[in-house]
Amino acid sequence: MIKRLWSGEHSRRLVMLRAFLEAAEVDPAVSTGPLTSLSEAWSALERAEKSDPRTVAGLLDHPQVGSWLSYTLRRHRGGARSPAPSYQDFGQLHAVAIVASAATGQVYRAVLPLRHGRVMLPQLGMAYFEDCADWDTAEAGTEDGRVWLRHGDQTIEVPSAPVDADGWWPLRRITVGDEVRLTVWVDDLDPMRDLADPVRPHRLSPTEFQRWANLLADAWTILVDDHRPMAEALAVGVTSLVPLPVGDGWDTRSASTGDAFGAIMCSPPPDAVTLAVSLAHEFMHIKLGGLMHLFTMTQGAGQPCLYAPWRDDPRPAGGLLQGIYAFFEITAFWRRQRARSGRLGDFEYAYARAMTREALDIALRDGNLSERGRRFAEALGDEMNGWADDEIDPEAAALARLVGDGHRAGWRIRHGRAPEEGVAALVAAWGSDTPPVIDIGPSEILPDPGMRHWSAGRLGLARRRILAPDRQAEALREDWGATLTDADVALFAGDAATAAQGFLAEIAADPESADAWTGLGLALCADSKEPVAAGLALTGRPEVVLAVYRAGAGGRSPLEVAGWVGERLAL
């Protein structure tokens, strides 16, 4: 299957090249500028392909070549902005032609663009010159399979081996495994290695590179020993690993993009298990991205309005389906791995299983799936049905529910806008002797263009509760727990009454605190065998409770308002 996806991606890459050439021909003076004509680069690629089609195909299929083509076309059509002249983007075709010519023993010479004094030669490395203007140019050429570059008085001879040299950083590779082997470029150089716009290189030190090599070797052992089908597929489907900078929060960050089939981006993980699950997670995105290039899985406008339990922002149908597929594999990973990871493994499994199941229900109900997409989602659900009776540590399961309920409520209070007429009806009914149950209808879901992140604290607190319960309060002084409060610590320690009082005090100090309102709902539900109406309202429709409270409600307390809404609202 993975080889078929690669074949599809290669066809897509050729179509993109044709679109690239057509875009360049719209205004050759703009796309070429001071560079050698792009037609010469194309002719060089044709000569190289005639000499060695497989080598040139491998170069064109390099993940970051796909990112560059996509970015160039996107910017040409107005979807991206940059201060760089257009020839900086289009001229990268010369760098591809240089690499193809050298690899196939062809002669080629061209003037190509420098971005801040640097140019990336795909699969080879990056040349960098001193004292250059931001959008300068350099000469480059091939001779007997070797590459040279020249700017002013400085000449760079690209070494035949992947070693550092004056003005040169090679693109390094790591190979791990024996019977099942994985070989990846460790790309800390390519301007197009990130998700969207060009980025500067962030060269790993020898120590940092070795740490990645060690972690990857250990993660690969886990995958091969315990998740072999995934490892065998991943070995064929992944060719590039992009180290991301360390980010705020508890979790390791990982990402992939359909523009760069075969590339996984990941921030430094704390351990090999985390890297293994990140590789599996992102590989599922890669696979489904390739499949969605071949088949229509969703339909409609693709508005970001759907709840994805693993995301802090609303998602479009395609994004939700992508997440479902990835979290299906995360669930399967922890189902197999939890025997080696104790109660934390039970938590991760219970949490991933609940998220995936809930998202599947949303996709099948509201996800605008095509018939093929619906069959795909139903097949995942059928597989998960066999996992429903798996035994899980009770505290781990309870913590997973707490985090899940809190995230859903936090998402609704931030992104849901309660219907104004319904809110007015609830407020107007406040003094009635026999107020009716009111169905105010669904809330409008507001997109989040800024993709703000807000949920890492409580998830991290749940993990801390399992790993080191005596150190929970320390989370308040750690970066990932910056948004947590004493009330959160009490909630996850099982002291719901103290947590409820703490959250009420937070609301008194800041009536707009989303986390205080949702925390109060979680505490009220946890403090009662039969959750009270106020708790159900604050976890089910917190945006309505907050809207009624804002509307005045006769100066009632948060508990009174939440209880009233819970009793009168058709949840």
Image: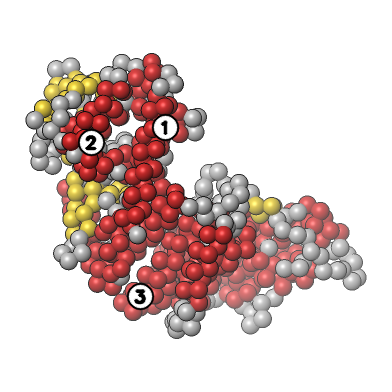
Residue 505: x, y in percent?
63, 62
Describe the element under mark 2 as helix, strand or loop: helix
Which residue is at 87% across, 68% downward? Answer: 435
Query: What separation in Å lies between label 1 and label 2 (alpha carbons)?
Result: 19 Å
Describe the element under mark 3 as helix, strand or loop: helix
Quadrant for residue 138, please give it. Answer: top left
Query: What separation in Å lies between label 2 and label 3 (alpha carbons)?
Result: 45 Å
- How crowded pointer 2 is (Cα within 10 Å; few <14, some 14-19, many 20+) is rated as some
Which residue is at 34% across, 17% downward? Answer: 33
Identify residue for label 3: 336
Disc 2 marks which amino acid? Glu
Disc 3 marks which amino acid? Arg
Residue 172 visible in the current orientation: yes
Quadrant for residue 165, please give it. Answer: top left
Quadrant for residue 550, please give it. Answer: bottom right
- Indicate the colouring scheme: secondary structure
- Left or right, 203 with respect to 483, comes to left
Which sits earlier in the primary sequence, circle 1 or circle 3? 1
Which sits earlier in the primary sequence, circle 1 or circle 2? 1
User: Viewer-proximal residue, 237 or 107?
Assistant: 107
Identify residue for label 2: 49
In the rendered image, the vertical position of residue 475 relative to residue 394, given as above or below:
above
Which residue is at 49% across, 69% downward? Answer: 379
Which residue is at 22% across, 67% downward? Answer: 221
Identify residue for label 1: 19
Residue 344 visible in the current orientation: no
Residue 266: x, y in percent?
33, 52
Which sits earlier in the primary sequence, circle 2 or circle 3? 2
Query: What separation in Å lies between label 1 and label 3 (alpha carbons)?
Result: 45 Å
Which residue of the protein is positioned furthest toward the front in this rendering? 50
